[in-house]
Image (cartoon, helix red, strand yellow):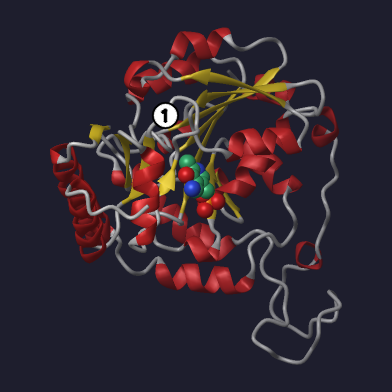
Amino acid sequence: MNRQDIEALVRPNIRALCPYSTARDEYQGPLGIFLDANESPYPTGYNRYPDPHQKTLKAQLSSIKGLPAENIFLGNGSDEAIDLCFRVFCTPGRDNAVAIAPSYGMYAVAADINDVQMRSVPLGADFGLPAEALLAACDAHTRLLFLCSPNNPSGNAFDPAELEEIIRRFPGIVVLDEAYADFSAKGSLRAKVLEYPNLIVLQTLSKAYGLAGLRLGMAFADAYVIRLMSMVKYPYNINQAALDLVSQALKQPVEAKVAETVAQRGRVAAALPAYGFVRRVWPSDANFLLVQVDDADALYAHLLADGIIVRNRTRVRGCAGCLRITIGLPSENDKLLASLDRYEKGDIHR
Ligand code: PMP
């Protein structure tokens, strides 16, 4: 695909959009007496609007992620970027999107909000990538294809070569959600956005970086796609406090925490199959495990009574009997396993 192909996929009203021009867009000279944005002149630390283009934080992320700033979009969580994909590429009531299932629930919710039909394609055996079925689900009005690797809730990362083949063959925008890629040995495909203009890779600071409360999601894509998303976003979508705190936090290394989480994932995954009530533990490339048990509702209630809250996914299609368990601190995982020991012995809360 080339730039013209991508342009043809954009909603006509967005292609023609004249974006809002902020006071900071119209004056970019040296600091002076700012009487141009109807801000309060009384300092509170936050009386000025933040940089709508987030230049400083993008420069910092550019060196961490190894991609030029023009290929980076910053959103209020990756949830904002997911919504923007629909707003930029899908004409409501006409276009459709395709996604693997089960996967992260926001793809379908964002589709519903934008009045875009979502076509869910079940994952194959062992939650494998159904490449042919995904491509077969597309028609002339399919604009977006959502893939998530490592996938939530199954935890598995897909083979990068298989993902790349889909990106090459799909005649629309592939949104590859890599929220959990920091925990995976399979790595990231974000560098491929320089090669494939129809690829948007999503990452987030909510998981490995431990900053879910600050709401900072990233989309990596061709510079033209980034410009489209930036035109449609709210002008000041990342607030000044988030810009400052994220910038500080990025100076702290995360590798040791990620390594501990990965080691704890191995430890919990190894301990679980010994319980008689555990039917299956899927291999995980993320910071959680999907576990199939004899009675998911009963185990969920037992853990809850012990003050341990997991995600009950038993009513999700393809996840019957499954709980999704996030990997916690070593001491929290100790308590989880101790609670499972009691459940095994019949010392059950109901
Ligand atoms: N993508 C996936 C696959 C997720 O599981 C989640 C959060 N559970 C998100 C995106 C949302 O991330 P953010 O906090 O950046 O909005």
Q: Please provide percent x and percent y for residue 20.
A: 83, 54
Tell me what residue is drawn at x 67 percent, y 70 percent: 50
Q: Please provide percent x and percent y for residue 51.
A: 66, 66
Picture layout, residue 181 above or below residue 234 = above
Task: Please state which amino acid type lies under the numbered disc 1.
Answer: Ala
Tell me what residue is drawn at x 85 percent, y 81 percent: 35
| Residue position for label 1 | 320
Picture layout, residue 31 above or below residue 129 = below
Quarter holding residue 22 = bottom right
In the image shown, does 314 or 110 lie closer to the viewer? 314
Give the SS element for disc 1: loop
Q: Please provide percent x and percent y for residue 207.
A: 41, 54
Picture layout, residue 41 above or below residue 344 = below
Q: Please provide percent x and percent y for residue 80.
A: 64, 48
Using residue 314 as the reference point, say whether residue 255 is left or right of it. Answer: left
- Report how many numbered discs are placed on residues in the image: 1
In the image shown, does 71 or 340 lie closer to the viewer? 340
Q: Is residue 16 visible?
A: yes
Picture layout, residue 53 above or below residue 140 = below
